[in-house]
Amino acid sequence: MFTGLIREIAEARSFNNGRLELLARYRPQVGDSIAVNGACLTVTALSNKGFTADVSHETAAAIALENLRGKVHVEPALQFNGRIEGHFVQGHIDYVGKVSNIIKREKSIDLFIAVRKEALTLIAPKGSIAIDGVSLTVSETFADRFRLTIVPHTLTNTLIAGYAAGRSVNIETDLFARYTARILRRHDSINWEDVERIGAIF
């Protein structure tokens, strides 16, 4: 489990046969979970200057593999011994979207991301979303894309300032939205008792 708050910009040194070698200041332990560009990976080896993590076939099929080079977002797993910020992120990538447009504002940018229409059923204005592991709030949704407002702090502390139209991004939709949608799909009809039960769960 993660929060979507990036702790380090690391460098992907190599990616071969499912093994991702990273140069990083963060010092994990072998077996630790760590999110790289939002995807939960397992640390398998340590080096003097970083660590290696395995990328399974299932993960490789679900993420933007082309971004596992150069600079990458890194976040260690959440520890439940302090304040929790961001939002609950599992590190399970749901979709790969593409940056369709970027509009620069005075102190922020509007980032538009195109995605399959089925994904938009899980994306709501003012709802949480993780883009390449970064916890963000959805500003607006459209028929085939959604808009994010990226504030200066996020631009300074993530790689998003360098994104350009056409870049693929890893998308993890809101955990609660996914489970609620699954509950609703499993029932032909739903009543107020069901709604109250779902609310009690979340």
Image: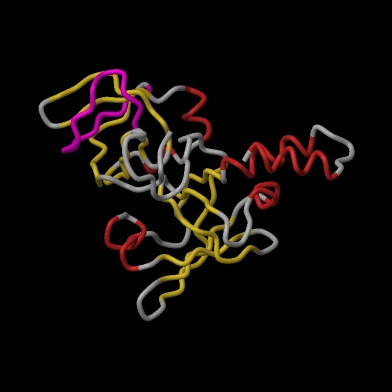
Judge by depth and name the residue closer to the eye, 97 or 139: 139
Q: Quadrant of the C terminus?
A: top right
Residue 182 horizontal/vertical position (percent)? 72, 35
Is 163 placed above or below 45 here? below
Residue 153 x, y percent position in the rendering: 31, 63
Vertical placement of residue 124 versus 59, above or below = below
- Kindly give the residue lying farthest to the right in the view shown: 189
Report which quarter residue 104 is drawn in.
Answer: bottom left
Q: Residue furthest left?
A: 48
**Image location (x, y in percent) of residue 67:** 38, 43
Q: Establish if 199 lies above or below 45.
A: below
Which residue corresponds to the image point at 46% horizontal and 56% vertical from the top-left?
Answer: 136
* Quadrant of the frame with the N terminus: top left
The answer to whether 69 appears left or right of 58 in the picture is: left
Task: Tell which of 198 and 164 is nearer to you.
Answer: 198
User: Which of the 4 image quadrants contains residue 44?
Assistant: top left
37 or 86: which is nearer to us?
86
User: Eyeballing the image, is 19 above or below 84?
Assistant: above
Left or right: 67 as drawn, with respect to 145 = left
Looking at the image, which residue is at 46% across and 50% down?
A: 131
For the view shown, which residue lies furthest in the bottom direction?
106
**How many numbered discs?**
0
Magenta-highlighted residues: 18-34
Residue 170 falls within the magenta-colored stretch: no
Tell me the colour scheme of the image. Answer: secondary structure
- Taking the magenta stretch, the answer to whether it contains residue 21 is yes
Rendering coords of residue 59 (x, y %): 48, 29
* Residue 15, image quadrant: top left
